[in-house]
């Protein structure tokens, strides 16, 4: 049985850990509020850009733009995996890594074996996981979530676009956690290049926006474009692709903070349960020690009385 000192030391250790987890929960909650504000502001713009791109594609010949044209054969592919830079967020990182790994095994196993699969890992956890397993990584995007900026998203999008235009890879997919609410995320595998025929719809997009009906109605209308639909498409397409990566990074950031807040809340509750058990164990051990001392004193007194 553990001594009173061991139990006291363990109680102090758990109390210190509980203070840390409670503080981390409060920090994550504050970061989550800011992350939610950013993603709620970005989503409508990103969605509307996608709607405009889909509409413009119906006004021009898609084959006139190389980013719309699928390559004849998928001889190489790029997967952009967005994770976090830090842990202590429950299964947040492991879930998106598992989703990316499963997707690669299902779709690009042959490319991985032949050395024609490339990864851009945004976030330290994904970078270190796939680097240890011998994947070909493009660039180093560890630490971007310490000071998340649109420039980081532009850099990722530019590398993906340049590689596609240069025939270095024939498809680009993005794997990330979409922010659903504080306690849950959607693991998304989103087509990036070539630009899909219809705008890709995530579960949140399907829920929040009656997008397809609006889009179908929009196609039935006639618009006058100035200067022309092709010129507008040339201007909007790079901005749309940049915002697709930016939105995915913001979704992942908000989902990470929500997952960390829940994980730290659970850790704080578990610490309280453990403290309750330890205090009960301490009181029982203390009572046993006191009882033992009383018995020893009583026995000693009886022995002295008999000896006298």
Image: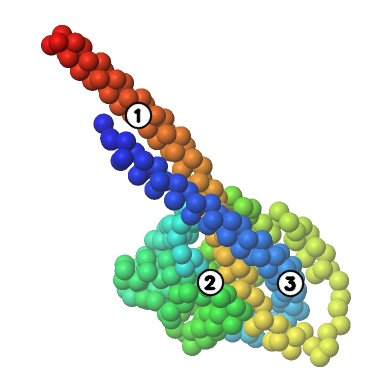
Please say whether residue 107 is visible from this viewpoint. Answer: no
Q: Nearer the viewer, residue 163 or 145?
A: 145
Q: Where is residue 67 in the image (x, y as percent from the top left)?
A: 59, 81
Q: Could you tell me which secondary element the residue under label 1 belongs to?
A: helix
Tag of residue 286: 1
**Are circles 1 and 2 on residues that touch, CB within 8 Å?**
no
**Are circles 2 and 3 on residues that touch, CB within 8 Å?**
no
The N terminus lies in quadrant: top left
Using the numbered discs, state the Cα–Cα distance from disc 3 to disc 1 in whole angstroms.
64 Å
Q: Could you tell me which secondary element the residue under label 3 belongs to?
A: helix
Residue plotted at (61% across, 74% down): 246
278 left or right, relative to 192: left
Q: Is residue 53 above or below residue 226?
A: above
Q: Is residue 46 above or below residue 264?
A: below
102 left or right, relative to 178: left
54 left or right, relative to 29: right
Residue at the disc numbered 3: 45
Q: Which of marks 3 and 1 is nearer the N terminus?
A: 3
The C terminus lies in quadrant: top left
Residue plotted at (43% across, 81% down): 139
Tag of residue 145: 2
Judge depth for marks 2 and 3 and give the one in front: 2
Q: Nearer the viewer, residue 119 or 39?
A: 39
Q: Where is residue 2 in the image (x, y as percent from the top left)?
A: 28, 35
Residue plotted at (86% across, 75% down): 222
Using the numbered discs, state the Cα–Cα distance from disc 1 to disc 2 in whole angstroms.
49 Å
Crowding at mark 1 (Cα within 10 Å: few <14, some 14-19, many 20+): some
Q: How many marks?
A: 3
Residue plotted at (35% across, 44% down): 9
Q: Which of marks 1 and 2 is nearer the N terminus?
A: 2
Crowding at mark 2 (Cα within 10 Å: few <14, some 14-19, many 20+): many
């Amino acid at each position: 049985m553990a001594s009173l000192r061991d139990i006291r030391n363990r109680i102090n250790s758990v109390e210190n850990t509980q203070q840390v987890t409670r503080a981390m929960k409060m920090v994550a909650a504050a970061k989550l509020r800011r992350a939610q504000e950013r993603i709620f502001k970005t989503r409508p713009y990103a969605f509307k850009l996608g709607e405009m791109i889909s509409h413009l594609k119906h006004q021009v010949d898609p084959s006139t733009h190389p980013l719309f044209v699928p390559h004849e054969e998928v001889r190489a592919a790029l997967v952009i995996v967005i994770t976090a830079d830090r842990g202590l967020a429950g299964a947040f990182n492991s879930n998106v890594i598992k989703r990316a790994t499963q997707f690669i095994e299902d779709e690009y196993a042959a490319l991985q074996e032949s050395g024609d699969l490339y990864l851009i890992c945004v976030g330290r956890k994904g970078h270190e996981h796939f680097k240890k397993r011998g994947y070909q990584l493009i660039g180093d995007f560890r630490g971007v979530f310490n000071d998340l900026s649109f420039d980081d998203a532009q850099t990722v999008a530019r590398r993906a676009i340049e590689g596609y235009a240069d025939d270095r890879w024939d498809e680009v997919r993005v794997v990330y956690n979409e922010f659903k609410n504080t306690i849950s995320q959607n693991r998304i595998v989103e087509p990036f290049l070539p630009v899909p025929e219809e705008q890709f719809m995530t579960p949140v997009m399907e829920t929040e926006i009656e997008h397809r009906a609006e889009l179908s109605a929009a196609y039935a209308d006639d618009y006058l474009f100035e200067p022309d639909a092709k010129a507008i498409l040339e201007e909007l397409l790079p901005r749309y692709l940049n915002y697709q990566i930016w939105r995915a990074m913001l979704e992942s950031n908000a989902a990470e903070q929500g997952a960390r807040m829940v994980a730290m809340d659970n850790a704080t509750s578990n610490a309280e349960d453990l403290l309750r058990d330890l205090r009960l164990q301490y009181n029982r051990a203390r009572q046993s020690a006191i009882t033992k001392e009383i018995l020893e004193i009583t026995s000693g007194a009886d022995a002295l009385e008999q000896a006298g």
